[in-house]
Image (cartoon, rainbow, N blue to C red):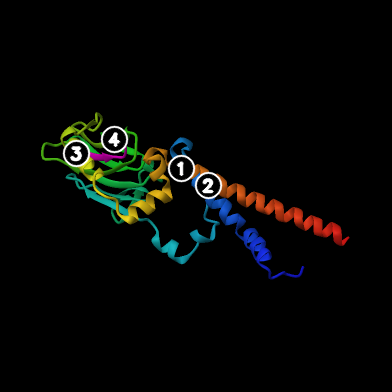
């Protein structure tokens, strides 16, 4: 088939070539916006066949460390992007309870070991790992009184003195709320405004970003699919006229 170098032809062929990337980006955006409801973070998949996971750079990354701790008893742990590991001599042994879970911080308290992970707050007590609090946990810090403070997304700073019962640290969270009110009165930077326009937060707020993402993602999927459909129909008409 002879390629017509007119603008419409370039538009048609460009749309056809980019249809798959646009469809993937649009559909994946919707899945990302609803990852908690769909539970995609907990689903293990084998994607090593994809070219991006087989590059030398990807292999060199290996296990990405995020935190490390040696307890008073001499046990060493390494928290990674891929899960929690215990150091046995010079070999890493995976902790099954936190397999494939991003571990952000490790802290030791008199009542046990506390892990801040993407899947929540985890506690090791009497050689058993258990999840004490669901959510997206970040930094875990030991306090002088023997308690642990953990930052939990959407709940703020939580404190516990036994590892199982977690409560908001009112002193810290009140100070954060006051600082947030003061920050709200300050003008936005251009970079922040552009980012909020991009994510939809400027229109629907942080909790409603999914509405914007769904609209944009579904629109991209629709345009990609209808573009391919229109091209296919045009080719069938040309073939029928040439016959």
The alpha-carbon separation of the residues under discs 2 and 1 comes to 10 Å
Most extreme residue toward the right, as rendered?
243
Question: Who comes first in sequence, dot 3 or dot 2?
Answer: 3
Q: Is residue 153 magenta-colored?
A: yes
The answer to whether mark 2 and mark 1 are in CB contact below 8 A is yes
Marks 2, 1: nearer the viewer: 2
Q: Dot 3 corresponds to which residue?
A: 178
Instruction: Please name the predominant secondary structure of the magenta segment in the image.
Output: strand
The answer to whether mark 1 and mark 4 are in CB contact below 8 A is no
The alpha-carbon separation of the residues under discs 2 and 4 comes to 29 Å
Residue 62 % position (x, y)? 40, 58
Q: Residue at x 24, y 31 (%)?
A: 166
Q: Can you say which quadrant of the picture contains the N terminus? A: bottom right
Q: Dot 2 corresponds to which residue?
A: 217
Q: Residues within 10 Å of mark 2 (few under 14, many from 20)?
A: many
The alpha-carbon separation of the residues under discs 1 and 4 comes to 19 Å
Q: Residues within 10 Å of mark 3 (few under 14, many from 20)?
A: few
Q: Dot 4 corresponds to which residue?
A: 155
Q: Dot 1 corresponds to which residue?
A: 33
């Amino acid at each position: 088939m002879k390629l017509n170098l007119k603008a419409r032809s370039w538009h048609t062929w460009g749309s056809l070539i980019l249809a798959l990337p646009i469809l993937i980006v649009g559909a994946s955006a919707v899945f990302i916006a609803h990852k908690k409801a769909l539970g995609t973070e907990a689903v293990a998949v084998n994607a090593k066949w994809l070219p991006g996971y087989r590059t030398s750079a990807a292999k060199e990354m290996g296990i990405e460390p995020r935190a490390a701790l040696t307890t008073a008893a001499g046990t060493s742990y390494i928290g990674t992007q891929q899960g929690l590991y215990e150091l046995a001599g010079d070999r890493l042994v995976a902790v099954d309870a936190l397999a494939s879970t991003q571990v952000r911080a490790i802290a030791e308290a008199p009542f046990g070991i506390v892990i801040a992970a993407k899947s929540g707050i985890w506690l090791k007590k009497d050689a058993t790992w258990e999840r004490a609090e669901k959510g997206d946990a970040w930094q875990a810090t030991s306090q002088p009184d023997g308690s642990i403070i953990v930052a939990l997304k959407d709940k703020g700073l939580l404190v516990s003195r036994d590892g199982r019962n977690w409560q908001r640290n009112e002193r810290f969270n009140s100070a954060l709320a006051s600082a947030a009110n003061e920050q709200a009165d300050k003008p936005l930077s251009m970079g922040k405004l552009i980012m909020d326009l991009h994510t939809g937060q400027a229109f629907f707020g942080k909790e409603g970003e999914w509405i914007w993402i769904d609209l944009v993602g579904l629109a991209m999927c629709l345009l990609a699919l209808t573009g391919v459909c229109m091209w296919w129909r045009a080719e069938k008409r040309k073939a029928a006229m040439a016959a």
